[in-house]
Amino acid sequence: MTQAFIFFMEHNFIINAFLLGIGLAMDAFSISLANGLNKPKMNFKDVLLMVFVFGLFQALMPLIGWHLTSQLAEKFEIINKIVPYLALILLLYIGIKMIVEKDKKEEKVSLNFSVLVIQAIATSIDALSVGLTMIAYSFSKALYEALIIGIVTFILCLIAYYIGKKGGNKLSNNAPIIGGIILIIVGIKIFISGVI
């Protein structure tokens, strides 16, 4: 019993970071699912780029939040208040655009690097607030937690894309509508959880 307790205490940080990563990755998971629905024929290199970008931003945002809280604590609250509005605007824009372009040919409905970055920012920007929980951490500990969050996001988004891809092949013309609706719902969820 004592050895189990010691093991848990020594690895508690890793367990917490892993669970935090799962929680933070859910928005990016939903977007990856939507991308799989909308673009089921992406090649593996593009899929890896997509999930890498999501993982990268999901790891960067807590680090930025950690920096803001440790260096600019009094200004962070102002930044934190605009996060839900920014996420809502970005995801509404992408979601509505996806629905409006549903009747265009597949090659015209783009999922280029700039769109990926917008999606990554919109789904990870709420992770800025995680920096508040990391205020007592050293930079190395904050970096370690951020890396775990990024890796968890990468893996979950990869799984989500292929789930969406399978559904996208079956749903055909309705896939962009479903994907756009998912984006809009995620944006609204981030907004509501951020302002309440």
Image: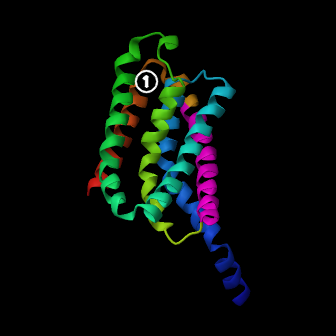
Side (left or right) of 161 relative to 76: right
Residue kind at label 1, given as amino acid type: Pro
Dominant secondary-structure state across the stretch colored magenta: helix
Quadrant, the C terminus: bottom left
As drawn, the residue found furthest toward the right would be 3
Q: Which residue shows up at 53% across the image and 23% down it?
A: 112
Name the quadrant containing residue 146: bottom right
**Magenta stretch contains residue 149:** yes
- The spot of residue 189 in percent (x, y) is 34, 47
Name the quadrant containing residue 143: bottom right
Q: Nearer the viewer, residue 99 or 52?
A: 52
Q: Which residue shows up at 60% across the image and 21% down it?
A: 41
Q: Which span of residues is magenta-colored? A: 139-164
Query: Which residue is denoted by mark 1 in the rendering?
Result: 176
Side (left or right) of 191 relative to 138: left
- The spot of residue 86 in percent (x, y) is 33, 41
Q: Which of 1 and 196 is in front in this view?
A: 196
8 w.r.t. 143: above or below: below
